[in-house]
Image (cartoon, rainbow, N blue to C red):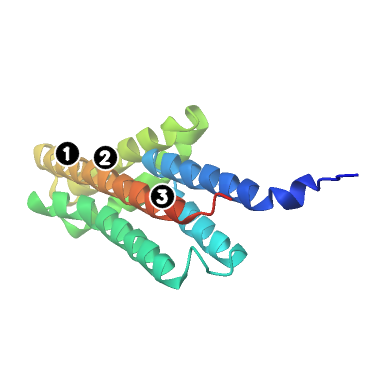
Amino acid sequence: MNERVWPVEYAGLIISILSVLLILTGVVMTIIGLPGNVLILLTGLAYGYYDQFDRVDYAILVVVFGIFIIGEVIEFAAGMIGAKKEKASKRAMLAPFIGTIVGGIWGTALLPIIGSLLGALVGAFIVTILAEYSKTKDLTQAKKVAKSMAKGQVLGIIIKSATAISMAILLIYQLKWQ
């Protein structure tokens, strides 16, 4: 009698497929403004542990972590650089972080998934205008600062999304498919 033990025979393939699904979910999360790069990094680490760091070894994980850090730093800096171009006050340069969090939460509540990104951008924009206006009392300057900051944030999101795709390609290429 030829008995097949399905789960054991296909365990590696199933884990690789689940890893790909988690990694791709992380890419989508990053694109819509959620912390998907963290999910990608943790999935790579978990797969490396499962695989005893054979295919997804320490060197690959260090590269993936490096890409992760680059994406985070660029996203953090992009909005500030945009605001600094317009000679924004320190208050206006720090305000978008609060606006992004509050706007992201409200956006998610009103329109799940894409609302997170839109809410974060709108929240950062509004809070930046308020912060700059409260410092300078110049609405025109406040709008300029907010527009420049928003452009920087969008550029940061694009670059961070590119890092998510890079991390995904690197990890998926390393998975076992047997």
* Residue at point 17%, 38% (across, down): 147
Label drawn at residue 125: 2
Amino acid bearing label 3: Ala
Q: Position of residue 125 (x, y in %)?
A: 26, 39
| Residue contact between numbered discs 2 and 1, judged by CB atoms under 8 Å | yes
Q: Tell me the crowding category of disc 1: few under 14, some 14 to 19, or many 20 or more residues within 10 angstroms, Cα based.
A: some
Circle 3 sits on which residue?
168
Q: Compute the Cα span from label 1 to label 3.
A: 32 Å
* Between marks 1 and 3 in the image, the one whose residue lies nearer the viewer: 3
- Which corner quadrant holds the N terminus? top right
Amino acid bearing label 1: Lys
Q: Tell me the crowding category of disc 2: few under 14, some 14 to 19, or many 20 or more residues within 10 angstroms, Cα based.
A: many
Residue farthest toward the right in the current orientation of the protein: 1
For this view, does 76 lie left or right of residue 32?
Answer: left
* Residue at point 59%, 46% (across, down): 18
Q: Secondary structure at mark 3?
A: helix
Q: Compute the Cα span from label 2 to label 1.
A: 7 Å
| Quarter of the view holding residue 128 | top left
Amino acid bearing label 2: Phe
* Residue at point 31%, 35% (across, down): 122
Circle 1 sits on which residue?
147
For this view, does 69 lie left or right of residue 146?
Answer: right
Residue farthest toward the top in the current orientation of the protein: 111
Q: Position of residue 171 (x, y in %)?
A: 44, 55
Q: Earlier in the sequence, mark 2 or mark 3?
A: 2
Q: Secondary structure at mark 1?
A: helix
Q: Earlier in the sequence, mark 1 or mark 3?
A: 1
Compare residues 76 and 141 and report the one nearer the observer.
Answer: 76
Compare residues 127 and 31 and report the one nearer the observer.
Answer: 31
